[in-house]
Image (cartoon, rainbow, N blue to C red):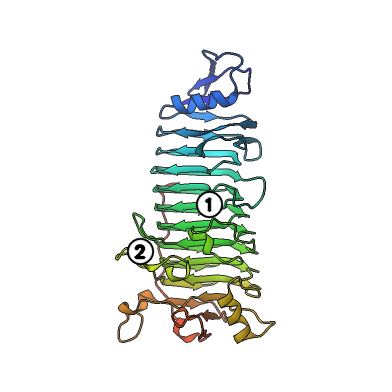
Amino acid sequence: MRIRTALLATSALILASCGQATETDAPEADISAEQALMTQLIDAEPGDVIEIPEGTYNFNRGLSLTVDGVTIRGEGMDKTVLSFADQIAGAEGLLVTASDFTIEDLAIEDAKGDALKVNEGENITIRRVRTEWTNGPSQDNGAYGIYPVQTTNVLVEGNVAIGASDAGVYVGQSLDVIVRNNRAEYNVAGIEIENTVGADVYDNVATNNTGGILVFNMPELQQEGRVTRVYDNQVFANNTDNFGHPGTPVASVPAGTGIIVNSNDDVEIFNNEISDNKTGNIIISSLFTTGYSESSTSESFDPYPEGIFIYGNTFTGGGEDPDTPELALARIMLFGEDGRLPDIIWDGFYDEAKQVDGVTPDALRICIDNGDVGILNANGPSGFTEPSTEMSPFECSLEKLPAVDLGRS
């Protein structure tokens, strides 16, 4: 294993083998730490540990890594800062197309596009990384903060994601994922699991986003997602106005959404603390309420959320100022000017072709076992004109989903 350290300008590049530091061919004295890091990423070999000391490093071009088995390590997310405020080239701050990759203890700020993207890798660890757009919520910000996509065996833990115009922490089209102990704030979507199979999302804090935690399936992607557990999270006051780009899936997320499941199957939501999300604390919806037309989907795509089990959550406040005209009208119709919507909202779309004698099969039901928590069936098929609060169709339970096991602590 080589430990390679990018030092400040006018300092030498240090290599260490098996932990024994030695000076080696030093670069010219005027080489910058930024140039040193770029060189190390290009010249990396499997097993390398690239250490970046405390400091702020400014890049005008995106960084990339294509070698398996590399670790990038800073001295802390508030000490080692990679700034891309002056970026003129590259679609990401750091793009990684490699397996057995670890990045930890640094920050990536103000990337032109996505901050950290990991594409098509296995055994990925993203730990104690801060991604942030420092000017606050803006449509001019990059889309994704932490962005593993088409990856397998992924651990995303202890990170902070701020200001993404799509999702702060996003895991897409992936397999076997744990997202834990992160904080997502002032993004459109705080944490998003999309078209992913096998994800555990727990012990996170999502606040001040447009939507706190999203579990989505979108059409025309290589796999459909299922089997996601969302538990032991704090999801509160996600009331930031939606600043997503028009036409993107998250642009349809109402401001004031706590947890939303869209077109995804086999989802458990339990033991969360969910509060003060002005539209709804939990929303369950189909593709038909995202603004995407049915013609944009393939025949094999299932647009309906099925097998959803909600239990053991703690709810406080929320639902008092819905961010859609349909829900705003339903609130007044059913609960009066000073009322609030129930903690769980369903758009009401279901797959008639899967009904058996007019009844949804048990495994496909939306089940709620959460004390006296209520639900609003917004009744989308009626044009949202006949909302209902009838609870009996949702009084059921489902078999618990298995935990995700990454084979590592």
State the residue in front, 153 or 321: 321
Badge 1 marks a residue whose secondary structure is strand
Q: Earlier in the sequence, mark 1 or mark 2?
A: 1
User: Which amino acid type is marked by label 1?
Assistant: Val
- Residues under labels 1 and 2: Cα distance? 25 Å
Q: Give the left or right position of residue 302, taking residue 233 as reference.
A: left
Badge 2 marks a residue whose secondary structure is loop
Q: Is residue 84 visible?
A: yes
Q: Is residue 395 visible?
A: no
Residue 297: mark in rendering: 2
**Image spot of residue 341 (x, y percent):** 60, 78
Q: Is residue 98 shown above or below 265?
A: above
Question: Which residue is at a point 53% across and 80% down the rendered structure image?
Answer: 376
Quarter of the image where one finds residue 70: top left
- Does the CB distance between marks 1 and 2 fall below 8 Å? no
Question: Which residue is at a point 44% across and 24% down the rendered structure image?
Answer: 43
Question: Which residue is at a point 35% across and 84% down the rendered structure image?
Answer: 359
Local crowd at mark 2 within 10 Å, few (<14), some, or many (≥20)?
some
**Image spot of residue 249 (x, y percent):** 48, 60
State the residue in front, 400 or 167: 167
**Image spot of residue 12 (x, y percent):** 58, 17
In this view, the mark in front (1 or 2): 2
Q: Is residue 76 shown above or below 317?
A: above
- Residue identifier under label 1: 169
State the residue in front, 156 or 131: 131
